[in-house]
Amino acid sequence: MRSAFKTKPPRYPSNWDDFPAGEHIRHAVNTVCNDYAERIFGYHFAKLGSLSAEINLHSSPIRHHINHVPFNDLVSDKLNDDDGSGGFSNRNSASGTSLNEGTGEPKKSRGNTVVGQSHCLPFAENSIDGFLLANELDFAQDPHEILREVDRVITQNGYVIISGFNPLSLAGIAKFLPVKRGNILHDARFFTSYRIKDWLQLLGFEIVEQRQIMFSTLFFQQKWKGAVKLQDYLSSYLPWCSAVYVILAKKRVIPMTAIKPKRNLKPRFSAVGASVRTSTVNRTLR
């Protein structure tokens, strides 16, 4: 198995629009993550990466959400801002969100934004109750470092939601074909869900649930009307070939309780040798 560390960091997406079918992927991942977020309780929830920051968890019972984005994503938002505020006016307010055409759902949720790298989180140990990594590991130079930081910061019995691209799908095959070579999907790592779950279990996480979504190449926009029925059919009979998977894992901490050794009890009856037993039998016969 190849090492997860990559000498050259892959290109990092600034938003879901960098993918040809980015809006379809975002909507599918958002639906599953929103369902998972209903089970996570606590005080603080962190979204790692620019893709995670655009996932709106409106059903989450946790009020305080932190968007941890890289510096280049902050600079691109600043350059694309047209209101003359330099891209920082709506960073800490809900007014910075925009609605998607047709769905009416919030596209971005930029409240409480923190700028930094995912492999070096500026949070205290045991301080975050939930994490969302929306395809963050697929564009990471060293995903092990990110998961170790998550393990350091997450609370006991905290949850982590991870989505990723499946290499055993049509999208994984199209990655190695000369199709839209300039697309950022060709730079994605495409880790299998089994490998991600193995990393999580080594860090003491319990896999709670996994869902398979998006049965397409992801390199083209879906325009066929029967795509929804085909998605339902494949999800029922061929779930292993889905283009995207979403994993929900829970941190398990086993307390180290000292067990006191039992006291050595003295036996009530002492062992009797064979010579003693024969002498007592002879006495009774006499």
Image (spheres, rainbow, N blue to C red):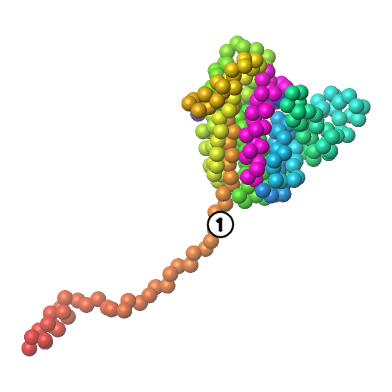
Residue 211 position in % (x across, y down): 56, 33
How many numbered marks, from 0 up?
A: 1
Instruction: Using the image, determine if residue 226 lies above or below residue 192.
Output: above
Instruction: Using the image, determine if residue 201 lies above or below residue 192.
Output: below
The kind of residue on which mark 1 rests is Pro
Residue 137 position in % (x across, y down): 63, 31
Q: Quadrant of the C terminus?
A: bottom left
Q: Most extreme residue toward the right, as rendered?
A: 84
Residue 70 position in % (x across, y down): 75, 32
Q: Most extreme residue toward the left, as rendered?
A: 286
Describe residue 106's horizontal placement relative to residue 147 as left or right. right
Residue 181 position in % (x across, y down): 65, 13
Instruction: Using the image, determine if residue 48 lies above or below residue 244.
Output: below
Q: Quadrant of residue 63?
A: top right
Look at 80% across and 32% down and name the residue there: 97
Nearest the viewer among 28 and 273 is 28
Residue 117 seen: no
Q: Which residue in the structure is indicated by mark 1?
A: 255
Classed neighbour count for the residue bearing mark 1: other residues with Cα under 10 Å, few (<14), some (14–19), many (≥20): few
Q: Quadrant of residue 101?
A: top right
Q: Say whether residue 36 is magenta.
A: yes
Look at 56% across and 44% down and name the residue there: 205
Q: Say whether residue 130 is magenta.
A: no
Nearest the viewer among 44 and 76 is 44
Nearest the viewer among 8 and 40 is 40
Look at 74% across and 30% down and name the residue there: 105
Q: Quadrant of residue 119?
A: top right
Tell me the magenta residue range.
Answer: 17-40
Residue 113 seen: yes
Describe residue 251's horizontal placement relative to residue 97 as left or right. left
